[in-house]
Image: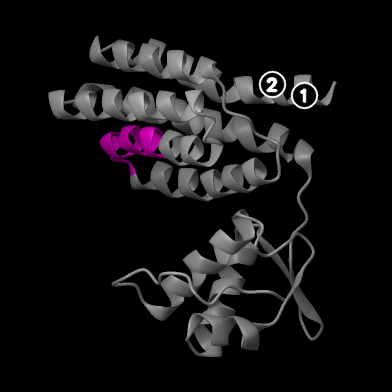
């Protein structure tokens, strides 16, 4: 199981939090491949922690659908089915749409400026074909809206689903296009005009469009 040893460890995290975040990221970006068997001793050594936080992290990752644990046998990374996008995006689209509606009444000039700046960075990444950067910036754009909505339950559910979006991206199920730039711009304008309902509708469309684009790539 090839595990990097030169990664930068996040600061101010517990051993469990650090283990969880790093193992999840390795699964998302394909460092740990689908169906790969995981050895908690190797993971603990690579992360510089004991086996306990690794085991606790693997249990949480199983709940979130990233690993499968077979007691007394093995723990392995879950498979990636490209058609998972059709199950993943509808609930995420609804949650992101709700975030836009909830965030609209709480927008400040500073938040609007940050959204516009982030979308400009997103556009640059798209035009320069820096797909990974575009994914991270797109995530940051939606996180700004989610943070402004200030609903911890929505934030928690979005965070889990967003991690699966990242995994599908690395396995070529999700492609970001220039249409998202335009939709982001319109969402900002609608929120700026305090039209939370319209912003919510467009936000849902922004996420669900990826399903149609995925289908077109398969044909």
User: Looking at the picture, how far across and down is residue 176, in whole percent?
Assistant: 57, 28
Above or below — where is 206 with respect to 144?
Answer: above
Location of mark 1 (residue): 217
Q: Nearer the viewer, residue 177 or 50?
A: 177
Q: Nearer the viewer, residue 79 or 1?
A: 1
**In the image: residue 187, left or right of residue 208:** left
Quadrant, the C terminus: top right
Label annotation for residue 121 = none
Query: What span is in magenta?
Result: 140-151
Query: What secondary structure is marked by label 1?
Result: helix
- The colour scheme applied to this rendered structure is one colour
Tell whether position 193 is magenta: no
Examine the image and state in which quarter residue 136 appears.
top left
User: Looking at the picture, how far across and down is residue 211, in whole percent?
Assistant: 68, 25
Label annotation for residue 213 = 2
Numbered circles on residues, count = 2
| Callout 1 touching callout 2 (CB < 8 Å) | yes
């Amino acid at each position: 199981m090839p595990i990097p040893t030169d990664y930068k460890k996040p600061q101010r995290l517990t051993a469990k939090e650090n283990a969880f975040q790093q193992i999840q990221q390795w699964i998302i970006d394909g460092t740990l491949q689908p169906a790969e068997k995981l050895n908690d001793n190797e993971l603990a050594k690579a992360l510089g922690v004991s086996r306990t936080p690794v085991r606790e992290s693997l249990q949480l990752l199983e709940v979130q659908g990233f690993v499968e644990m077979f007691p007394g046998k093995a723990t392995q990374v879950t498979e990636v089915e490209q058609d998972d996008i059709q199950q993943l995006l509808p609930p995420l689209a609804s949650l992101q749409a709700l975030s836009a509606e909830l965030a609209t009444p709480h927008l400040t000039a500073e938040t609007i400026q940050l959204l516009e700046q982030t979308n400009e960075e997103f556009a640059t990444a798209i035009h320069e074909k820096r797909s990974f950067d575009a994914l991270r910036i797109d995530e940051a754009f939606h996180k700004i809206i989610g943070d402004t909505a200030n609903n911890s339950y929505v934030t928690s559910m979005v965070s889990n689903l967003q991690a699966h979006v990242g995994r599908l991206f690395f396995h070529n199920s999700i492609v970001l296009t220039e249409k998202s730039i335009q939709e982001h711009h319109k969402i900002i304008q609608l929120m700026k005009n305090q039209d939370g309902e319209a912003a919510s509708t467009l936000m849902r469309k922004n996420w669900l469009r990826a399903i149609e684009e995925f289908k077109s790539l398969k044909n």
